[in-house]
Amino acid sequence: MYWINLKRIIKSGYSSFMRSGFTSLASVLVMTITLTVFTGLLYLQATLHTSLENIKDKVDVTIYFVPGTGEDNVMAVKDSLTKLPEVASITYTSQEEALANFREKHANDYLTIQALDELNENPLGSSLNVKAKDPSQYESISKYFDQNNEASKEALIIIDKIDYHQNKLVIDRLTSIIVGAQRLGFALSLMLIIVSIMITFNTIRLIIYMSRDEISVMRLVGAGNKYIRGPFMVSGALVGVFASVITILLFWPVSVWLGSQMSEFLGINLFHYYTSNIFEIFFILLFSGIIIGGISSLFAIHRYLKK
Amino acid sequence: MIYLNNVTKKYYGDEPSLVDVTLTISSGEFVSVIGHSGAGKTTLAKLILAEEKPTSGTVFFESLDIHQLSSRELTQFRRKVGVIFQDFRLLPNRNAYENIAFAMEAVGKDDAEIANLVPHVLALVNLSDRTFHFPHQLSGGEKQRLAIARAIITEPELIIADEPTGNLDPTNAADVINILKKINDLGTTVILTTHNPSIIESLGKRVITFDKGKVIRDEVNGKYML
């Protein structure tokens, strides 16, 4: 009996969705708008995430050593830094590499190169480029050398400068922008999602309101509440299914355009994002669509089944 | 079969639709309820269907107080009652076959039985050639015959027909009444509300006359007198 009822509910939900033509089309379109908002927010989050990663990646602390410092000493400092839990990676640049980099950078600057050539010795010191796991941790890494411990005492003699203090202002500002953008993005997403769900809910409520006579007839004919509710929920879920298919197709050309025109500006190729995550995106849309459609129908029909 | 005890129904802020009505309808009867518009005929039908609750008094179906039933019990009760309305109230998105099949599905009949019985009932009300037509493709008389088919397919113990001929021409009206008479002959109790005098004259059955919510006449072989 259970399976027969389920089969009948699905069948009648499907046929009433198909036969309602224009009404179904209208609710699919409204649901498509909701799911477009969802996808837009996914893209926004992806873009935001990538830019944040890029910014985070650009922040670092470089420790410059006094020229002539032995590699052993530098390595000792590197080892002690590696032990810090905040440190993600450390890159060592030797005096020779520093010089090579400098020459390359100023290859077209004839005067500077000439001045450099006149010096007999390498004026550049070696350096350690330190990356933290999180931008907020640079402060504690740079303070490590201010603390009065064995390793830092020795290190302070050979350290020329730590550029963190010069970058501090920029780093602080970036950190706060990152945190702010994440919060704003989250609040904005939440608000848009709530608004779009409410619009869809009201559309479905309106459609069920139009069917209220039909519902009362079903009750009079002796149909149980579950048997009346079922087909409406199936129709609601179908609205979600169709809308998610339309949305994912709609975002194909949009992503192509964003990928070819906006990649430079956004720092992420959204077409790659679309193609590599298409199943995840479609699943999220399908799942949200079915849940929103089904639950909206469930709530909307509730008032006509009381008594 | 049906017992109304001192039933009064008041709608919000209006004159009462039914005033202290006490009635008994026995199994197998064909009862016509007549009266002017607003006399309380439709309110009576709604109370027996448990679509409305009485302001005071009780309505019993056999030993069931139908206004004390739970939602599940109410569903069970309604399966014993077939309803026919003046405005047909068919399911607009389903064709003739599906409208009738819905009533059987709701009661939990299996597919084979539905496939077997529906064409029979459609033939009975002379709608075999309209099987796959939707309600909007049917004439008034056809719609009402379809509504009757839906009401009788579950073999209810009671049929309530609330002004079933109100929207029909005399020929179609006579058709509808004839079908109801046949159903009654097979043992089903029928309650018919109407304000069509010729129908009452032709029936020669019990007539209950309402005026301003009160029963003013209840005769075994009634005439149409208002």
Image (tube, rainbow, N blue to C red):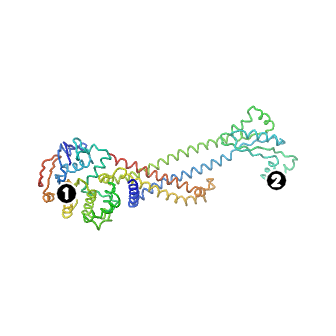
Q: Quadrant of residue A259?
A: bottom right
Q: Residue at x 25, y 66 (%)?
A: B126
The residue most toward the top is A148
Tell me if mark 2 has few (under 14), some (14-19) or many (20+) residues whose alpha carbon lies within 10 angstroms of its own: few
Q: Nearer the viewer, residue B79 or A202?
A: B79
Q: Is residue B74 above or below residue B99?
A: above
Q: Is residue B19 above or below residue B88?
A: above
Q: Position of residue B166 (x, y in %)?
A: 21, 58
For residue B135, which numbered disc appears in the image?
Answer: none
Amino acid at dot 2:
Tyr
Q: Position of residue B70 (x, y in %)?
A: 31, 44
Q: Quadrant of residue A156?
A: top right
Chain of the residue where label 1 is placed in the rendered structure: B
Q: Residue at x 80, y 49 (%)?
A: A97
Q: Nearer the viewer, residue A249 or B222?
A: B222
User: Mark 2 — residue?
Assistant: A110
Q: Position of residue B189 (x, y in %)?
A: 20, 54
For residue B184, which numbered disc appears in the image?
Answer: 1
Chain of the residue where label 2 is placed in the rendered structure: A
Amino acid at dot 1:
Asn
Q: Position of residue B46 (x, y in %)?
A: 24, 49
How far separated are the C-alphas under marks 1 and 2? Answer: 115 Å
- Which structural element holds mark 2? helix
CB atoms of marks 1 and 2 within 8 Å: no
Q: Nearer the viewer, residue B169 or A40?
A: B169
- Which structural element holds mark 1? helix
